[in-house]
Amino acid sequence: MPLTVEDKLAIQELAARQFRYLDAHDVDAWAQCWIPDGTFIANYGTFQGHTSIKEFLRGHIAAGKEDGARHLGANHVIEGDAERAEMYSVVVKLQVVQSPFIIATGIYRDTLVRTPDGWRFESRRLDIDPGVFAAGPRA
């Protein structure tokens, strides 16, 4: 059975909630967006399971990497069936406490599964755009 419009909206809602929890530094709620043995993959490493995902985010927050940040997700392309889905989306990370500027941009490639509690990430891969790490003059 193909994905319904309701499924696609629920998946987009999950992605939006994940960013809301990240921006609020709500580590426990952020990790609950994954299945218990789910995986978060990024330039920082691979983190599997709620405990590992929480440890990563706690360290990331402690290092100041999320201070004043707001994440915007867009361009969701979702394909799959009633039980599993793949999602492509883009992210823009803004600094909003100081004078606003773009901190980073990237692409998410996700695998999602339907659970009794709704859609959750089985795998969420973040590829941060290479220009973020390039040294260059600021305009």
Image (tube, rainbow, N blue to C red):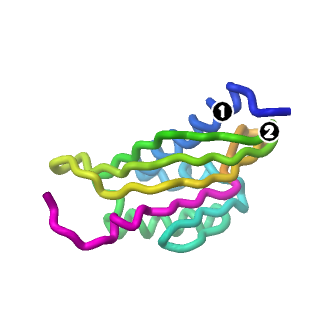
Amino acid type, callout 2:
Asp
Which element type, helix, strand or loop, lies under badge 2? loop
Residue 34 is a magenta residue? no
Q: Residue at x 80, y 39 (%)?
A: 81
Label 2 and label 1: CA atoms lie apart by 10 Å
Label drawn at residue 72: none
Res 15 quadrant in image: top right
Q: Is residue 13 left or right of residue 101?
A: right
Q: Nearer the viewer, residue 80 or 124?
A: 80
Mark sitting earlier along the chain (2/1): 1
Give the residue drawn at x 69%, y 48%: 86
Q: Which residue is mark 1?
A: 8
Is residue 2 shown left or right of residue 10? Answer: right
| Side of 67 relative to 17 (left or right) | left
Q: Secondary structure at mark 1?
A: helix
Indicate the position of residue 67 as horizontal and vertical percent values.
30, 57
Q: Amino acid at mark 1?
A: Lys
Q: Which residue is mark 2?
A: 81
In the rendering, at what x and y percent does residue 22 appear?
45, 51
Is 84 rendered above or below residue 40?
A: above
Q: Farthest top residue?
A: 5
Residue 50: x %, y % from top left: 64, 61
In the rendered view, tell whether residue 19 sits above or below residue 47.
Answer: above
Q: Residues within 10 Å of mark 1 (few under 14, many from 20)?
A: some
Compared with residue 122, is residue 12 higher up or lower down, i.e. above or below? Answer: above
**Furthest residue in direction right, as rendered:** 1
Residue 29: image location, x then y, percent: 55, 48
Q: Which residues are magenta?
A: 122-139
Q: Residue 96 or 1: which is nearer the viewer?
A: 1
